[in-house]
Amino acid sequence: MTVKEAVELLRKGLSYARRTKFKEALLYYNKALSLDPNNPEAWYLRGSLLIDTGKSKEALLDCEKAIALDQNYAPAWSKKGLAFYNLEKFEEGLYASTRAASLNGNDVNAWYIKGVCLDELGRSDEAQEAYGKSLELEIILDIESEKKKVGR
Amino acid sequence: MKTEMPLSKPIRRFLNTTEELLDTEISLLRQPDAEPGGTLVDIYTYDIERNVIIFPAQYIGLLKDFIIAKHCTNLMIKGAATKKGEYKVCSYTEDSVYRGLRQIYLDALKDEASKKEKLPVQKLIQLLFILFSHFNDDVNELPWNTIVNASVYHRMPKIRKTQLYHVMKESKNDMDEMMEQEEIIPRRYFVLNKAMFYARDMFLAKTLPADELMPVLNIPQMKKFNHLEVKEMLTTRWTHTAWYQSKVFGDNMLEIIDKPLSQVDWNGEPTLDYYYDLYKVGINLSSNLLSYMTMRDWYVWEEPKHLLMAHDHKEEYEKKALKRIFGDLIADSWGDST
């Protein structure tokens, strides 16, 4: 029952986060985590929210918890890459985003973070490759989004 | 600039330079329903404390970076002009609205005379200010869009592919504009609208360089005009179509755009003076376009506040202009429509 309840709380939290109501979202995520601390998604979602509110250090810990629960949880690797990038730890950001991109080749964020980290590390040619992949995926997302708008 | 969004190196540098040179602050805002080309809400136009660049939520990587680069360049131009005490936009007054609406009405009458299905008078009257306003928006946007794109292309080589995708998308949307109203818009204005976008796209196709951006290649209605021989041009019935005329006007507008922009040193040191010079080029180019379209007395160059005020009074200006054109006849019909 607690697992189900936690999932419901996460859903509500996410809905608040999407509307940039971060305080309310955080409350729901915290409740979900107290009910089910073994849910990697809960740690990942709270980590994402912490990044959005400028708390990359704390976010990093949440991403690591999510990864500890599921080594192959691609979104958590992706956010971890972003948190490292924000903390200007580009080598670590590159490692995390590369891992994220290998787990989920369609993650635009992962490819983009990989590109910006490589750029910061002066590896311009490799950065261009990562940017190229990120752009390719972003264009697909954009076309899909435009189609949805037309369909509305 | 304080943001938790990841940004590529050249964009971050450009944002910082812009803030430093203009001594201002820029915020980045992601919004689900933002315009595809993003929006710049700036302190030089609106009475606000900091500049905001808004872009669609699905832009997370280089598309976002391109939007930021584009609006940052625009901000630099506006800021530099303001700091030199000269930032002006294309605005309108009660008198200039009258001149514009009167001209559109006269052109519409000529068009209507040759049409089998006449446009109801009420609709024709409503169309006048819509067209006037449309060209005002276009003149305030299109020349700057051209300049900004050329500048971003030269200064940000890393985002050129992104820029090409975006410019092509923008071009398609602009060319689709007014399409559904083709039959009701006076031919002259349909042609001028298309010609402006044609000229911009041709210029960018040469600058970027990207053949696929050329209107005669990517606009279905214009494909048949590519590589036409002179004899064909003179004899074919196509010469009477709005699209062919758009190409002819567009080629002339391309010259107007190309001439001043080919003199610009796109890689010059990015100082306030440099962007102020770009502003002057833009104003000059816009004025020349207005002259070419014989719309020079429709608009006035004024501070942004003037244009915001004009927008607030647009209904009043429209009513007064219509009254001057149609006299007492308009009182009843206007009353019916409101």
Image: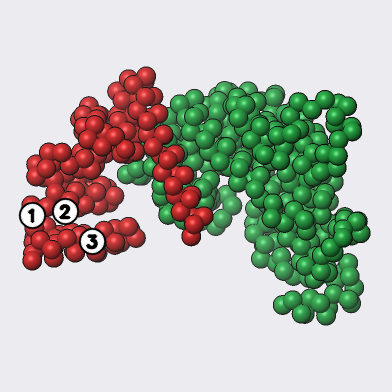
Chain colours: A red, B green
Label at residue A11: 3
Between B147 and A44, the one lying in front of the other is A44
Residue B218 place in picture, x, y as percent: 64, 35
Q: Nearer the viewer, mark 1 or mark 3?
A: 3
Label at residue A37: 1
**Mark 2 sits on what residue?**
A42
Between A151 and B322, the one lying in front of the other is A151
Residue B277 place in picture, x, y as percent: 65, 32
Label at residue B98: none
The residue under the point 52% across, 35% down is B165
Which amino acid type corresponds to the residue marked 1 in the rendered image?
Answer: Pro
Sequence order check: which comes first, mark 1 or mark 3? 3
Between B280 and B83, the one lying in front of the other is B280
Indicate the quadrant where residue B273 lies: top right
Give the distance between the C-alpha atoms of the residues marked 1 and 3, in whole angstroms: 16 Å
Sequence order check: which comes first, mark 3 or mark 2? 3
Quarter placement of the C terminus of chain B: bottom right
Callout 3: helix, strand or loop? helix
Q: Is A146 placed above or below B236 here?
A: below
Which amino acid type corresponds to the residue marked 2 in the rendered image?
Answer: Ala
Mark 1 nearby-residue class (10 Å; few <14, some 14–19, many ≥20) = some
Q: Are marks 1 and 3 on the same chain?
A: yes
Q: Are marks 1 and 3 in contact (CB under 8 Å)?
A: no
Sequence order check: which comes first, mark 1 or mark 2? 1
The residue under the point 65% across, 26% down is B206
Give the distance between the C-alpha atoms of the residues marked 1 and 2, in whole angstroms: 8 Å
Mark 2 nearby-residue class (10 Å; few <14, some 14–19, many ≥20) = many
Q: Are marks 1 and 2 in contact (CB under 8 Å)?
A: yes
Mark 3 nearby-residue class (10 Å; few <14, some 14–19, many ≥20) = some
Residue B134 place in picture, x, y as percent: 71, 54
